[in-house]
Image (tube, rainbow, N blue to C red):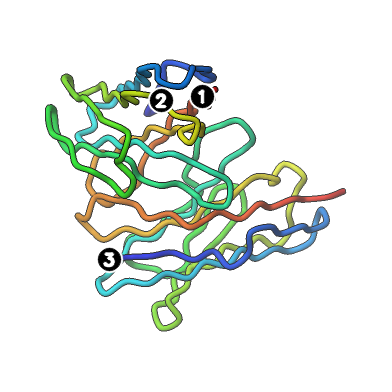
Amino acid sequence: AQSVTQLDSQVPVFEEAPVELRCNYSSSVSVYLFWYVQYPNQGLQLLLKYLSGSTLVESINGFEAEFNKSQTSFHLRKPSVHISDTAEYFCAVSAPQGGKLIFGQGTELSVKP
Amino acid sequence: DVKVTQSSRYLVKRTGEKVFLECVQDMDHENMFWYRQDPGLGLRLIYFSYDVKMKEKGDIPEGYSVSREKKERFSLILESASTNQTSMYLCASSPLRGDEQYFGPGTRLTVT
């Protein structure tokens, strides 16, 4: 079975500052890893995912995450945030062919001017 | 673009009522899921389905049932709504097991 822990429930940051949202997972098998974003009053949208290959994955809006197998982590980073990045971010894990995504508790990113 | 639609964005029901939440996807996905989302708890899986007329319990199935008569439609049923079922309900679909899921906009259900 897999589990996910997002280490911060809320992250306040000023505009143009760097940010890191932390995610650790537990699994006895190989994993797929995902970051989703949820803007207010909307459903979840995929931000980026790691299935295999390069451990560094990037999104189209400047976020990146690195799969670290030894530390069982998949932290999300952005070097310079915008007001529009304010949202809730969810880390999720699944087993290949396993079917189910296991979600973390979510991290609220609040970007202030 | 994959589109997952849910029948209502907001719903208010009384305790004891039977509630139907409908979800439709337009990309011929085999796999469909129902979650509830509560503050501080993230998303919790209620039921999922890998094929028509097939269903499996998720982590919190008590008080819910589902129906999948057609591939594109997955319905969540609250047989007798209770106040502790007040929540945001999210439907998702996926083409492959374990891979990315596509989410609908959610239904915010209030049971009074």
Task: Kindly identify the amino acid type of the residue bearing the numbered disc 1.
Answer: Val
State the SS at label 2: loop
Contact check, label 1 and label 2, Cβ < 8 Å:
yes
Write the residue at 22% across / 48% down: B97
Chain letter for mark 3: A
Q: Position of residue B105 (x, y in %)?
A: 49, 28
State the SS at label 3: loop
Chain letter for mark 1: B
Please name the residue that numbered disc 3 is placed on.
A1
Write down the quadrant of residue A75 in the picture: bottom right
Q: Position of residue A93 (x, y in %)?
A: 37, 59
Structural distance between the alpha carbons of marks 1 and 3: 33 Å
Task: Kindly identify the amino acid type of the residue bearing the numbered disc 3.
Answer: Ala
Q: Is residue A108 left or right of residue B24?
A: right
> Quick one: B15 or A3, which is closer to the camera?
B15
Contact check, label 1 and label 3, Cβ < 8 Å:
no
Structural distance between the alpha carbons of marks 1 and 2: 7 Å
Chain letter for mark 2: B
Write the residue at 13% across / 33% down: B54
> Quick one: B83 or B2, which is closer to the camera?
B83
Q: Is residue B75 above or below residue B101?
A: above
Please name the residue that numbered disc 1 is placed on.
B111
Task: Kindly identify the amino acid type of the residue bearing the numbered disc 2.
Answer: Ala
Q: Position of residue A111 (x, y in %)?
A: 77, 50
Q: Is residue A37 left or right of residue A57?
A: right
Please name the residue that numbered disc 2 is placed on.
B81
